[in-house]
Image: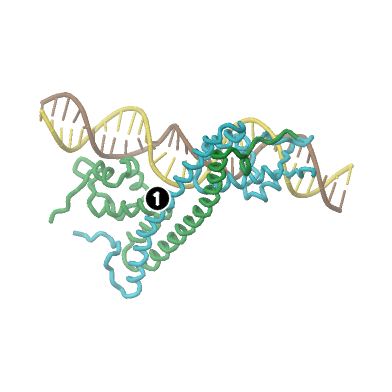
Chain colours: A green, B cyan, C brown, D yellow
Amino acid sequence: MVAESLSIGDVAAATGLSVHALRFFEREGLFLRGIPRSAGGHRLYDAADVEWLLLCNRLRESGMPIATLKRFAALVRSGPGNELDRLELLREHERSVRARIAELTACLEVIHGKVTVYERHVEDGTAAGLWAPVPSS
Amino acid sequence: MVAESLSIGDVAAATGLSVHALRFFEREGLFLRGIPRSAGGHRLYDAADVEWLLLCNRLRESGMPIATLKRFAALVRSGPGNELDRLELLREHERSVRARIAELTACLEVIHGKVTVYERHVEDGTAAGLWAPVPSS
DNA sequence: GTAGAATCTAGACTTCGCTCTAGGTCAAAC
DNA sequence: GTTTGACCTAGAGCGAAGTCTAGATTCTAC
């Protein structure tokens, strides 16, 4: 079983990241290994890199800063023995995602309330509860 | 009933925004009126400004960009007649907040899955499903 | 074997949303 | 009446997370 190698363009297509972003990620040390190069200097990725990037995407989409992702990558790179640290980092992120969902849900109630007020207004022409220009007093 | 006027510091305390941010918001045209000034040039806010800022906070926390908030403020400022536009803007934002919650929820599943894998590992010492350093092949 | 697409590096640039600085003025407490 | 703290303006600066450019090189398909 020969490991297929993927070009940066392939990986960009597979992960949704731009080739610029992939090079940027590498500079930032977000990969689990040094990406090998072809004779001509082109990057040669493999399926495991893509898999890792897909997890990175989830972490990033859910609001993890690059700096934290970098710490996580460093923990994984440094091998077995720090699983508790990795666990703590992931748990902390999970907490923050749950908190963010709760915050958004609270905002949603307020926003939906406003939407309802405007819907009612548009339907029957009352102005109650609407933001109107400040009356000249 | 005399409208109490509030200093920029009072409003900062009441809204959680910094005085810098309040001046920035004003420059950006995010208020519903021109904020009046004292004889000495200090800003004089009132309770309605605070109320509006609290809504702005909810919109901002839920991910509305300044530019959109600006459009919304402009609609409100321009008076009655554009309620449908305001409604559409709010509905669109509501949609985006719901979508964001859904996205976060999907990420959460992946993250929680990882947490579970690490918990199991830390408990009983298996390495299955963990990111390990790339084996030297 | 050559045209055109993809990739390379280093580093400058962009956007967003404030934050901070400098150099003053104003106001409230003692 | 002076000190101290809050406030003023204009504009520079910052951190995050890429994006883009230039100019050179490599790879792929005909």
The residue located at (21%, 60%) in the rendering is B136
Outermost front residue: A124
Q: Residue at x 36, y 60 (%)?
A: B109
Residue A97 in the image, given as x and y percentages of width and height: 45, 57
Relative to the observer, which residue lies in front, B2 or A54? B2
In which image quadrant can residue A43 be found?
top left
Under mark 1, the amino acid is Glu
Give the structural element (helix, strand or loop) at label 1.
helix
Q: Is residue A30 left or right of residue A122?
A: left
Q: Position of residue A108 (x, y in %)?
A: 51, 51
Q: Give residue B116's position: percent from left, percent from top.
A: 35, 67
Q: Does B63 sit left or right of A79 as displayed?
A: right
Residue at 22% in and 47% down? A44
Q: Circle 1 is placed at which residue position?
A: A61
- Chain identity of mark 1: A
Residue in the foreground of this view, choosing between C22 and A114:
A114
Q: Is residue B31 left or right of residue C29?
A: left
Packing grade of label 1 (10 A; few <14, some 14-19, many >=20) is: some
Q: On the picture, is D5 further left or further right than B76?
A: right
The C terminus of chain A: image quadrant: top right
